[in-house]
Amino acid sequence: MGDSVQKRPDPAGESGGETPRDSEGETPRDSGSGAPCDSEEESVREASRDCRPQLDCGESGGAPALLDVRDLRVSYPLKRGIFGRGEKLFNAVDGVSFKIRRGEILGLVGESGSGKTTTGRAIVRLAPISGGEIFYGGKEISKLPNSKFAPYRKKIQMIFQDPFNSLNPRMNIFEIISEPLDIHFPKMTKAQKRDRTAELLEIVGLESGHMARFPHEFSGGQRQRIGIARALAVEPELVICDEPVSALDVSVQAQIINLLQQLRRRFNLTLLFIAHDIAVVEYLSDRIMVMTDGKIVEQGPARDVCERPQNPYTKKLIAAVPKF
Ligand SMILES: Nc1ncnc2c1ncn2[C@@H]1O[C@H](COP(=O)(O)OP(=O)(O)O)[C@@H](O)[C@H]1O
Ligand SMILES: [Mg+2]
């Protein structure tokens, strides 16, 4: 696929999803690129190319991995046998191994149900780990008691798929963004939290004066920006982005991807970027891994995987990208 322009049908066409409800619409205050909306996809692709670091993507040499996942398994009970014995297990994540270097964006792509979300959630203990090891900065973290895991809850943040459901509708934007500050920086004064919230809103391209508003007053893309601001509040190192643009209109997708790219450079973030659309993953990722049935079937530099896919499943995903 490489250089050909890949466009997806506009999901908002059917859902009517992207309806900005304030005067700002979806135009960020400071997109950094100044690119008009209709050329946004092209600018995203160029931005992605220009700043892809020349990382050693192999297993040897280069910087040590920030995250090193080895043979990760997450199993759920499928069916209980009589008297609860002989329980059958379903492996949602079935022996997954990968590394992410500091500052790298690793794309995780696969169809719905392949185990992507479960992989991301297992890293932050939102899914139960049945086997394997997770090293963060060289330290094994999957078996730490919860009290010892607390620092990693700050270092590793998640951005969720659905900006409509992931923000508490009863909390205003200040409360949503400052909630993680209450947990991780309990000594911060209210004034400091307000300043930090204002700063975060500006970082993600929203008006700092809007912190008294509620989630329903924002469009889908703006809500995802709020989710990103909340994730950034505690200065994470690794951000697990679980389909952050899948629910958004295609032009808004490009703006959010552009924002993630800018934030990655600005804060030297490391991203695990999950999506079901390999074209979206290719825009942003340094490396891509392809998942199906709980297993990684292919991984490598983004361009290699997309231009010279080896696995039949990867070829199928690429063939499924609509071309206009
Ligand atoms: N809490 C759970 N209990 C039982 N099965 C689950 C649970 N969470 C996920 N699964 C199953 O695990 C598989 C992988 O799900 P998921 O990680 O959400 O896939 P993806 O994110 O790739 O769409 C699916 O078959 C899903 O039904
Ligand atoms: Mg998912």
Image (cartoon, rainbow, N blue to C red):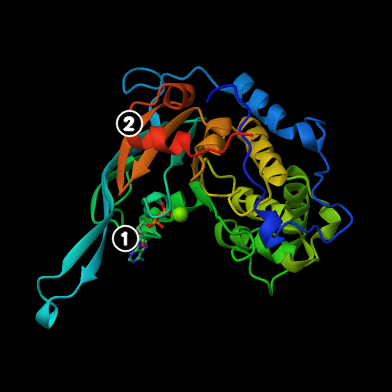
Name the quadrant of the C terminus: top right
Q: For mark 1, what is the residue?
A: 128
Q: Amino acid at mark 2?
A: Asn
Task: Report whether residue 209 is seen.
Answer: yes
Left-right relation of 293 to 116: left
Residue 269: name its quadrant. top right
Q: Amino acid at mark 1?
A: Pro
Number of the label disc, if any, that sits on residue 93: none
Residue 148: name its quadrant. bottom left
Residue drawn at x 66%, y 23% is 46
> Residue 125: horizontal and vertical position, in percent?
38, 57
Of the pair 126 and 292, the residue shown nearer to us: 292
Determine whether the beta carbon of the residue marked 2 sits less than 8 angstroms from the nearest atom of ligand 1: no
> Residue 302: horizontal and vertical position, in percent?
47, 26
Task: Report whether residue 66 is seen.
Answer: no
Residue drawn at x 56%, y 57% is 184
Of the pair 181 and 300, the residue shown nearer to us: 300
Left-right relation of 187 to 293: right
Residue 180: name its quadrant. bottom right
Residue drawn at x 44%, y 38% is 317
Kindly report the distance in space between the C-alpha atoms of the residues bearing marks 1 and 2.
29 Å
Q: Are marks 1 and 2 in contact (CB under 8 Å)?
A: no
Left-right relation of 111 to 296: right
Q: Earlier in the sequence, mark 1 or mark 2?
A: 1
> Residue 95: horizontal and vertical position, in percent?
24, 45
Label 2 secondary element: loop
Please identify, in this view, whether the residue under mark 1 or under mark 2 is nearer the observer.
Answer: 2
Q: For mark 2, what is the residue?
A: 311
Of the pair 51 and 282, the residue shown nearer to us: 282
> Residue 219: horizontal and vertical position, in percent?
75, 58
